[in-house]
Image (spheres, rainbow, N blue to C red):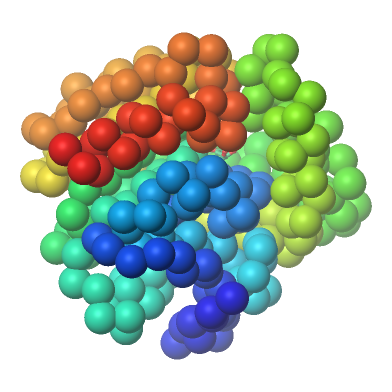
Amino acid sequence: MPTFRTPAWYTLGYSDTGHGPTVLFLHPFPLSGEAWGAQIQALAPEHRVLAVDFPGFGTSGAPPQGLTLASVAANLSRLLRGLGLARVSVVGLSMGGYLALELAAQDPALLERLVLANTRAGADSAEGAAGRERFAQRAEKEGIGWVAAEMLPKLLRRCPEAKVERQVSALIARATPAGVAAAQRAMAGRADHRETLEKLRVPVLVLTGTEDALIPPEESVRMAELLRNGRLEVIPGAGHLSSLEEPELFDRALVSFLTD
Ligand code: MLT
């Protein structure tokens, strides 16, 4: 797997598959770029697909102290421009969506199209941020053995498929305590990007699932309302990890939007 050494002393690992117009995938917490297997397969025949791992996850290096989404987004820009890519489409799910919005705010010229799946544009409340700090400290103290049990009910629909549950548990088991803590703190400190949404001119697809228990579908409706050039698709029966629970419907929406 290629890695990009950032000037901020951490590395970003990523997979790079196929040829054609480039699509960058940004994964949800606490998974990794591996979560995008079905989407990579669906798009790679006609696209170049990059799936980057957040610092502390998958093939990326350990996160530095005080990591911010702004730093990761700035380094994604550097990575893409270093690969000679002037414009890419970006697909971010949940934490990946927060990062995609930060990238859109910092480097709007880089965006061809944007997909914001199961995510929100607003920042955390003080209470939400405090909860993330408790989560981070627990991961640092106890490791991540407890994280799957804590998160699965929020990530998946009420009656998830056993296969998907196993897949997500296995992905969570590969996270690192440092990555989990850094990602929670970075999400807690993220900016409010509602204005970023209002300013965007590129086509944006907002995706969600009727059973998203972590970020209610109403958040997606509100995001779509702020967009000049937005489209909303609600996947019936999908929970928060809509790309893993309903990959066919997710990929159909994605391919139709990207090739429109
Ligand atoms: C995610 O699914 O990426 C995160 O759980 C989102 C969040 O914690 O806000």
- Identify which residue is drawn at 64% across, 29% down: 155
**Left or right, residue 122 beside residue 215:** left
Q: Is residue 180 above or below residue 229?
A: below
Q: Is residue 64 above or below residue 32?
A: below
> Between residues 237 and 252, which one lies in front from this camera angle?
252
The spot of residue 6 in percent (x, y) is 47, 83
Q: Is residue 15 above or below residue 214?
A: below
The spot of residue 30 in percent (x, y) is 66, 47
Question: Is residue 167 visible in this depiction of the protein?
Answer: yes
Q: Is residue 209 above or below residue 173?
A: above
**Left or right, residue 31 beside residue 109:** right
Q: Quadrant of the N terminus?
A: bottom right
Q: Quadrant of residue 164?
A: top right
> Between residues 212 and 121, which one lies in front from this camera angle?
212
> Between residues 57 and 256, which one lies in front from this camera angle?
256
- Identify which residue is drawn at 53% across, 25% down: 246
The spot of residue 21 in percent (x, y) is 25, 61
Question: Is residue 105 visible in this depiction of the protein?
Answer: no
Q: Quadrant of residue 152?
A: top right
**Left or right, residue 48 beside residue 30:** left
- Identify which residue is drawn at 89% across, 46% down: 145
Q: How many marks?
A: 0
Q: Quadrant of the C terminus?
A: top left
Quarter of the image where ligand 1 sits: top right
* Residue that lies at the very extreme toward the front in this rendered image: 45
The spot of residue 74 in percent (x, y) is 35, 71
